[in-house]
């Protein structure tokens, strides 16, 4: 295993971390029903091969991921890893909630401390209206003082501006977790966010390095580019090596869902390092990126000049979901997000065709004509 710096902390983290969000489940069962024996085997195998960072959260697998991780880390495994989990900050409504949730997590994880405790999935709204208003950081500091958590960080899902607001809004962050992969250099925190966090001495944990699996199974035309100059690398390895080449990245989490994926990613991690991705490799990734963008149906750049919509439609997000379905040949993935993780008032179906947005769009997209098409493709 290769080990890397973790911001300013005196801790060498394994290049690969284990994300416990996509554990194998019993056949034909719901996602809460984890295949316990297989999941424990996978986690312990990864640790035996040098992985020393395991990431879970209160909500993964409907609350069962923490219980499973707690079991996997018995028999001496707890001492071999740094354990990360996340506070479900959306459940914090009164001062005692933070401590109550943390105690519940410690019990489920069968441990007396969490090494890396993250405020889960911060966005601009959550930062302003929950973390600051409910004084959550004061509770986190008290828990640190009491030895129940060792390091305070956050995971993030929003845009670059929100990332800077959060990271510059508290001077005791020790690490953060961002969605980052070769297609997301200008999405979410993006490459600028990564560099900013690292420049402040934070450890940066990367999640969704394979875009939730999409980069592991790319469409045929993308595969052809990856294979073009005869370099023997799987699509997953291309995506992971691109990340490990960057010194600002501390650890790359992958949510592996079977033992074969664990094996593959361990092999990649063993061959990883800063500076190992050469100029030819970078060119391949640039060509892949260009090809992906050519697959997009709507030429939206996500600049948000069209916003705000008077009827609350989140125009760039609707276009991103639609383009994502075409780019990755994955309509089901986009439909799932559209219907289950996107407020109804923000969906394309709320468009009333007023066309105010169209005057502001630098790409001259006929937004009101696209909205019914987006809705009927994703509903
Ligand atoms: N804090 C947050 O808000 C948040 C959000 C997302 C993730 N996370 C954390 O970050 C971790 C990583 O994110 P992620 O799970 O989205 O990671 P990811 O690596 O982008 O996606 C994982 C999926 O990629 C596929 N995969 C992984 N390795 C592969 C391989 N060698 N060959 C083929 N396919 C492979 C699998 O898909 P299939 O199952 O389809 O085969 C797997 O389920 C999560 O597990 C979780 O711990 C946190």
Image: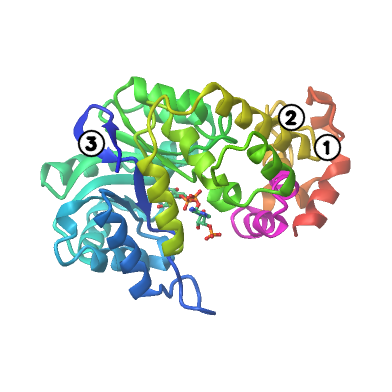
> Where's residue 172, x and y in %?
25, 29
Give the residue at mark 3: 12
In the rendered image, the residue lying farthest to the left is 146
CB atoms at circles 1 and 2 under 8 Å apart?
A: yes
> Where's residue 167, x and y in %?
38, 28
Ranked by sequence position, the earlier of labels 2 and 3 is: 3
82 left or right of 235? left
Secondary structure at badge 1 equals helix
Number of other residues with Cα within 10 Å of mark 3, as a class: few under 14, some 14 to 19, many 20 or more: some
Give the residue at mark 2: 306
- Kindly identify the residue that appears in the image at 35 percent across and 59 percent down: 58
User: In the rendered view of the protein, which quadrant contains the C terminus?
Assistant: bottom right
322 left or right of 87? right
Q: CA distance from mark 1 to mark 2?
A: 9 Å
Decide whether residue 334 is among the magenta residues.
yes
Q: Is residue 333 above or below residue 300?
A: below
Secondary structure at badge 2 equals loop
- Kindly identify the residue that appears in the image at 29 percent across and 63 percent down: 69
Q: CA distance from mark 1 to mark 3?
A: 49 Å
368 left or right of 334? right
Region rendered in magenta: 321-343
Relative depth, front residue between 107 and 132: 107
The colour scheme used here is: rainbow
> Where's residue 185, x and y in %?
56, 30
Give the residue at mark 1: 367
Q: Nearer the viewer, mark 1 or mark 3?
A: 3
């Amino acid at each position: 295993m290769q080990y890397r710096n973790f911001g300013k902390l005196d801790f060498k983290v394994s290049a690969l971390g284990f994300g416990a969000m996509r554990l194998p489940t019993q056949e034909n069962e719901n996602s809460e029903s984890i295949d316990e024996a297989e999941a424990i085997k996978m986690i312990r195998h990864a640790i035996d091969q040098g992985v020393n960072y395991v990431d879970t959260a209160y909500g993964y697998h409907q609350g069962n991921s923490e219980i499973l991780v707690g079991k996997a880390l018995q028999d001496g495994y707890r001492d071999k890893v740094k354990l990360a989990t996340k506070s479900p900050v959306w459940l914090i409504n009164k001062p005692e909630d933070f401590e109550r949730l943390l105690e519940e997590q410690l019990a489920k994880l069968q441990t007396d401390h969490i090494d890396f405790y993250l405020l889960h999935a911060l966005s601009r709204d959550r930062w302003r209206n929950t973390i600051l208003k409910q004084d959550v950081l004061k509770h986190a500091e008290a828990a640190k003082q009491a030895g129940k958590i060792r390091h305070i960080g956050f995971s993030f899902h929003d845009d670059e501006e929100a990332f800077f607001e959060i990271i510059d809004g508290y001077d005791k962050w020790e690490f953060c977790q961002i969605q980052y992969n070769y297609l997301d250099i200008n999405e979410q925190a993006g490459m600028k966010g990564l560099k900013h966090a690292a420049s402040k001495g934070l450890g940066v944990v990367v999640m969704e390095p394979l875009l939730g699996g999409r980069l592991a199974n790319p469409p045929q035309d993308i595969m052809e580019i990856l294979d073009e100059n005869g370099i023997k690398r799987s699509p997953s390895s291309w995506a992971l090596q691109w990340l490990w080449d960057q010194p600002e990245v501390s650890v790359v989490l992958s949510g592996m869902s079977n033992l074969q994926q664990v094996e593959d990613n361990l092999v990649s991690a063993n061959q990883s390092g800063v500076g190992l991705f050469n100029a030819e490799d970078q060119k391949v990734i640039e060509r892949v990126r260009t090809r992906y963008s050519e697959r997009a149906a709507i030429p939206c750049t996500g600049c948000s000049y069209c916003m705000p919509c008077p009827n609350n439609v989140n125009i760039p997000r609707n276009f991103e979901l639609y383009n994502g379905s075409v780019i990755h040949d994955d309509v089901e993935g986009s439909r799932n997000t559209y219907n289950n993780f996107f407020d109804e008032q923000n969906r394309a179906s709320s468009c009333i065709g007023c066309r105010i947005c169209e005057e502001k769009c630098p790409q001259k997209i006929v937004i009101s004509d696209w909205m019914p098409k987006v809705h009927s493709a994703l509903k």
